[in-house]
Amino acid sequence: MSARIANFDSYEFRQALGRFATGVAIVTTIDPHTKAPLGLTISSFNSVSMDPPLVLWSLQNTSTLLDIFLKAERYNIHILTAEQMLLALEFSRGTQEERFSHIDFSYNEFGIPKLAEFCTAAYFECYNKSQYHEGDHHIMIGQVERCSHSDYMPLVFHAGTFDLTPNSPQKK
């Protein structure tokens, strides 16, 4: 049996998907030739497995960074805090130099850019385990080598916009 023909257009599909709230993250790696930091904003992040620890995210086939992320040995995924809407926007447009010019970051032991802790609700240092091409995206599977989290609320994207809430540490 095969799939039925869709009874909706891409606008309706996008609107329906927008009903599912997602977190917002920035994925970073380095340019293999220049060693310059590279990064982009995503809202397609999910856990895959606890053993081994695996996460996934997806990247459009038209992304200028697709080839670099497909070949990268490692990348870092940073779940942004509720106060980082402007950072999410900066990493979704502009040049790579502009994206990194106004933020505090360091490099991990593999030379992969790691955003300052105050920017992140959580972060995952990943080995680029596998990729799958489906439709107009590539699904990236990362094996998590290091991770950490804070008590700050995450930035949430819902119905085509950011859900802005005051950011304060959650009570334990």
Image (tube, rainbow, N blue to C red):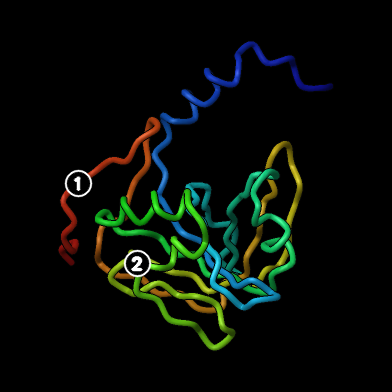
**Quick one: label 1, few (<14), some, or many (20+) residues within 10 Å?**
few
Which SS class for mark 2?
loop
Q: Is residue 83 left or right of residue 9?
A: left
State the count of labels: 2
Which of the two labelled residues, at mark 2 and mark 1, occupies the earlier sequence position?
Answer: 2
Residue shown at 44% from the left, 30% from the top: 18
Residue type of the residue flagged with mark 1: Thr
The residue identified by callout 2 is 102
Residue 84: image location, x then y, percent: 30, 56
Q: Is residue 13 left or right of residue 60?
A: left
Residue 98: image location, x then y, percent: 44, 61
Residue type of the residue flagged with mark 2: His
- Work out whether residue 68 or residue 44 is closer to the camera in this orientation and state it: 68
Looking at the image, residue 38 lies above or below residue 59: below
Query: Is the residue under label 1 in contact with that under label 2 (CB below 8 Å)?
Result: no
Residue shown at 49% from the left, 70% from the top: 124
The residue identified by callout 1 is 165
Residue 168: image location, x then y, percent: 16, 60
Alpha carbons under labels 2 and 1: distance apart: 23 Å
